[in-house]
């Protein structure tokens, strides 16, 4: 952790921290009622900060466990005086599981750890149980957007997501989507593209026939 990241954590974390509400009011942390967006695993935070600045009418919760990344995002938020981001430090599975039905208009999961070794696949975030919870937490018009640069994980995620009956693949069954303009191109992704690495986007909508569970 750099000195700047540590300073941001010590100085700004309380201002931007998000705690799972006991009473279920997930808007109170922002002081207004606006559509809620969740990004799981925001890394160093540049992408989430850019998204929030691009969409001032949305309120964004970022979930992350990597403290240097949290410090990095806090420094950006404070410098740019971003008002529509809050940070949950902890396991995103807990956050999603405790979210009321139809909480998020959008859930974003960009470049999750692929855990490439077969014996580690059980650690992957994207499995049937998590996807079902994420779908439940989406609003009726909600969207789940994932991206990865690891093709085997992309294929595995596609299979899991296509099998969830409450979600519909925006690109059609067994198809990947094009990167939308509002998904910021991170330095990590830009470097990978220059090296010839592929990136696969997966966008799913709440199925029109799904009723709240």
Image (tube, helix red, strand yellow):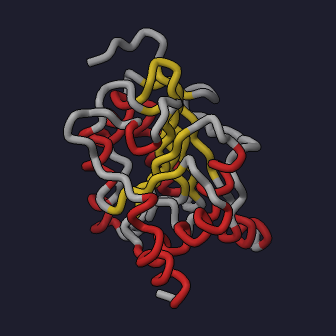
Identified at 57% across, 64% down, the residue is: 45
**Position above or below: 168 against 127:** above
List the single residue furthest toward the right. Answer: 194
Q: Quadrant of residue 4?
A: bottom right
Residue closer to the observer: 195 or 146:
146
Choose between 151 and 66: the one closer to the eye. Answer: 66
Q: Position of residue 25 (x, y in %)?
A: 31, 33
Q: Residue furthest bottom?
A: 3
- The residue sitting at 44% across, 48% down in the picture is 156
Q: Is residue 139 above or below residue 30?
A: above
Above or below residue 9? Residue 130 is above
Q: Is residue 170 left or right of residue 182?
A: left
Image quadrant for the C terminus? top left
Q: Is residue 163 visible?
A: no
What residue do we see at 49% from left, 50% from top?
Answer: 39
Report x, y in % for residue 196.
Answer: 75, 68
Residue 109 appears in the figure = yes
Q: In the visual, does 20 lie left or right of 134?
A: left
Who is closer to the viewer here, 64 or 151? 64
Circle count:
0
Residue 47 point in image, percent of width and height: 63, 58
Which residue appears farthest toward the top when viewing the image?
209
Q: Quadrant of residue 114?
A: bottom left
**Could you tell me which residue is drawn at 51 percent across and 90 percent down?**
3
Q: Measuring from the top left, give residue 201's x and y in whole percent.
A: 62, 46
């Amino acid at each position: 952790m750099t000195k700047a990241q540590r300073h941001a954590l010590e100085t700004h974390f309380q201002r931007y921290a998000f705690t799972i509400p006991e009473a279920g009011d997930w808007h109170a942390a922002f002081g207004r009622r606006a559509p809620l967006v969740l990004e799981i695993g925001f890394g160093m935070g540049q992408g989430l900060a850019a998204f929030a600045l691009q969409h001032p009418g949305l309120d964004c919760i970022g979930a992350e466990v990597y403290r240097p990344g949290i410090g990095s995002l806090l420094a950006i938020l404070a410098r740019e005086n971003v008002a529509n981001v809050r940070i949950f430090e902890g396991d995103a599975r807990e956050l999603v599981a405790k979210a009321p039905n139809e909480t998020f208009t959008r859930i974003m999961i960009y470049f999750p750890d692929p855990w490439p070794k077969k014996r580690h696949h059980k650690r992957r975030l994207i499995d049937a149980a998590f996807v079902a919870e994420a779908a439940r937490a989406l609003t009726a018009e909600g969207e789940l957007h994932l991206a990865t640069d690891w093709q085997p994980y992309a294929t595995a995620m596609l299979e899991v997501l296509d099998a969830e009956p409450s979600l519909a693949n925006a690109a059609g069954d067994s198809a990947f989507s094009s990167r939308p303009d509002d998904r910021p191109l991170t330095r990590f992704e830009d470097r990978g593209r220059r090296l010839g690495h592929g990136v696969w986007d997966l966008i799913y909508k709440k199925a029109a026939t799904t009723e709240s569970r």
